[in-house]
Image (cartoon, grey):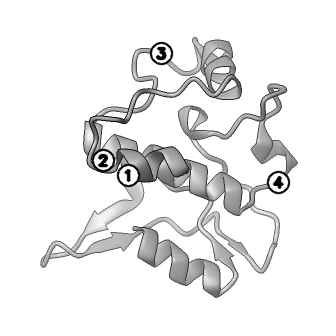
Amino acid sequence: ASKGLASAYELGVMHLYIHCVNFLLDGELNLKLGDWAGASIDGSRSHSTYWLKHCLISKDGTDVVSNGTSMRTEIFVLGTAMYFMEKGAEPRHELEDPWDKEEIQRRIAAREFPGTAELVLGAVIRKC
């Protein structure tokens, strides 16, 4: 996934809807990235958004995406997708969107993330 996204970024394209539901496997189990409908090309405005549990919230509680997507938001969301791939569950899976929206946002803003020390991809996820 990260190699495919890196290739897109080199071409000036940001996916903007990174989630495991958009990671597809072909007949030879090669990963393909799907749903590019909301992609940003050369900085164009996108009307796509990340899932709430995957949104990057700034420390002051502001939804970073509302200020525009960036490589930082893309990398953060890729980390949450990698977490999902390894754990088989969303980060903050015990919370329900939209009912727990404020608590989800509070935890992300406070940088309260699930532990990743035991995960094979843990060190990579923490860097996201």
* Image height of 54 relative to 3, above or below: above
Q: Quadrant of the N terminus?
A: bottom left
Q: Which residue is mark 2?
A: 85
Label 2 near label 1: C-beta < 8 Å?
A: yes
The residues tagged by marks 3 and 2 sit, at their Cα atoms, a distance apart of 18 Å
Q: Is residue 95 left or right of residue 57?
A: left
Label 1 near label 3: C-beta < 8 Å?
A: no
Q: Nearer the viewer, residue 72 or 18?
A: 72
Q: Which residue is mark 1?
A: 20
Mark 3 or mark 1, which has the lower sequence index? 1
Label 3 near label 4: C-beta < 8 Å?
A: no
Q: Secondary structure at mark 3?
A: loop
Mark 1 or mark 2, which has the lower sequence index? 1
Circle on res. 95: 3
Circle on res. 68: 4
Q: Which residue sits at x=84%, y=26%? A: 60
Q: Amino acid at mark 4?
A: Gly
Q: Amino acid at mark 2?
A: Met
Label 1 near label 4: C-beta < 8 Å?
A: no
Q: Residues within 10 Å of mark 4 (few under 14, many from 20)?
A: few
Q: Which residue sits at x=70%, y=82%? A: 12
Q: Amino acid at mark 3?
A: Leu
